[in-house]
Amino acid sequence: MYRFFVSEDQIDQNRIYIRGQEVNHIKNVLRMKPGEEMCVSTGGNLEYRCAILEYRESEAVAEIRYIQETELELPSKITLFQGLPKSDKMDLIVQKTVELGVCEIVPVAMKRSVVKLDEKKEASRLKRWNAIAKSAAQQAKRMIIPRVTPVMTFAQALDKAKENEVILMPYELARGIEESKQIIRAIRPGQSVCVFIGPEGGFDEEEARMAREAGASFLTLGKRILRTETAGMTMLSILMFQLEQEE
């Protein structure tokens, strides 16, 4: 069943009024007809099961059939601080980490990041990344649309990371798989967690030092060196398994 996102003001009694680009997608791409059902979310834990009632000039009107409380989100908010990667790797990272439950993605310009975005390029890519996040959230039946923020410096990212209760940094120089397992096992549902992933060249030693001073826990993901686009997905998979089994 298709899922769509609306704001609270688009709901009036037992009707939901879907506007904007979504109308064209529903009507002309998905070719949904009156009577066909869909799921609608406003970003909370309520899921609205609806059926298309009619199409108007600039909106689709859906009738609410029933409302249910659904716990589809992870019990902890996870933020991914991703070192800017080359090429279109960020597209894949956004798509897959949203599917795995991330709540926010922060692109970070690190010392070993090859990509340098000017203001125009950043605005264009940010628009695309957020569109990918929305599409992935719909496909994965998320209750929220995770946000991709503007690019930050490493220092700015660390300041933001300090808002979280747990700061994790998979680091290629970290040793001890048992210690890493203990760090993960200690995380409890409800704690806010952030993960730092380096770009292709990894973290600079100064960045690692700054992260340690900010309270980051270093851990290893095994004996193999993972690509930047693989490391984030691996960490999200581990956290998803850990947090959901504790519910």
Image (spheres, rainbow, N blue to C red):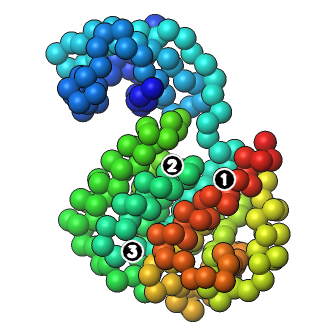
Labels 1 and 3: the sequence-earlier one: 3
**Which residue, given by chain and number where applicable, does mark 2 sit on?**
99
226, 121: nearer the viewer? 226
Specify the farthest residue to the front.
224
Tell me where residue 120 sits by quadrant: bottom left
User: Marks 1 and 2, Cα distance to the nearest angstrom?
Assistant: 11 Å
Where the N terminus falls, by quadrant? top left
**Residue 169 seen in this snapshot:** yes
Distance in Å between CA atoms under marks 1 and 3: 24 Å
Q: Which residue is mark 1?
A: 240
**Residue farthest to the left, as pictured:** 57
Quadrant, the C terminus: top right
Residue 133 rendering spot, x and y as whole percentages: 41, 49
Q: Earlier in the sequence, mark 3 or mark 2?
A: 3
State the image coordinates of residue 69 (x, y, percent, origin top left).
64, 23
Secondary structure category for the residue under label 1? helix
Amino acid at the residue labelled 3: Pro
Q: Say what amino acid the circle numbered 2 marks.
A: Glu
Q: Residue at x 68, y 58 (%)?
A: 239
